[in-house]
Amino acid sequence: DGGITQSPKYLFRKEGQNVTLSCEQNLNHDAMYWYRQDPGQGLRLIYYSQIVNDFQKGDIAEGYSVSREKKESFPLTVTSAQKNPTAFYLCASSSFSSGRYEQYFGPGTRLTVT
Amino acid sequence: GENVEQHPSTLSVQEGDSAVIKCTYSDSASNYFPWYKQELGKRPQLIIDIRSNVGEKKDQRIAVTLNKTAKHFSLHITETQPEDSAVYFCAASMKTSYDKVIFGPGTSLSVIP
């Protein structure tokens, strides 16, 4: 299970507080991604980054922010502007190897906001 | 932007039978179609993928077919086993691994022993 890690596994916050989810990879991948997983809605893309100091919005970026200061790290901040932040968050990194464009996922962080 | 639909949302099959999951995509520029399997409590993992210059690809008991004209692609699992029980996600992407990948909503497959 090494390669891409997320912490913490479970996170609890009060409404109105910002919270930052950690994602680290030691796979030397250039691209990193954040997804939100809700039951019945699959994996929805929040933000992705193709290179250090650059990132693009996904389909549901509102209420979220990211940074990419290092190749290995892509933290996601869930701000108080996110109307329904309780969800399971997955980070991924990407490589092209042996003809496969594979995304490697972290173990996820389950965020509960009350 | 790209939109990926997936059917059925749930699927139950008897062990040994085949399972088929179908997806459609909207953006004709998409040319890479991976399938991920997510077992309960685990992270999604790539199980097979296909590029738009190929119509079919097989890997042991799993196969994927692609119809570019109709913008359909399907996952076929033969001789299903209980360990095939999981949520399966199809996805569509363009060209490189650094482009965004759009996932379908998932299919929960249950294989009944």
Image: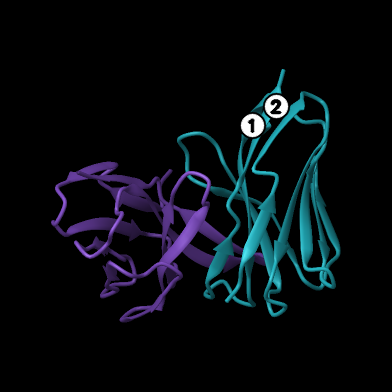
Chain colours: A purple, B cyan
Amino acid type of the residue tagged 2 in the rendering: Val
Q: Which quarter of the figure is the N terminus of chain B placed in?
A: bottom right
Quick check: A78 left or right of B88?
Answer: left
Residue placed at 33% from the left, 66% from the top? Answer: A72
What is the number of the mark on residue B85?
Answer: 1
Residue furthest front in the image: A83
Residue furthest top in the image: B113
Of pointers 1 and 2, the one earlier in the residue sequence: 1
Q: Is residue B56 visible?
A: yes
Quick check: A65 left or right of A30?
Answer: left
| Circle 2 residue | B111
Q: Are marks 1 and 2 on the same chain?
A: yes
For label 2, the SS is strand
Classify B80 as above or below B69. Answer: above
Residue placed at 29% from the left, 42% from the top? Answer: A9
In this view of the protein, which residue sits in the foreground, B27 or A26?
A: B27
Q: State the image coordinates of residue A53 (x, y, percent, origin top left).
A: 31, 81
Q: Chain of mark 1?
A: B
Count neighbours of disc 2 (C-alpha within 10 A) and say few if under 14, some if 14 to 19, many if 20 or more. many
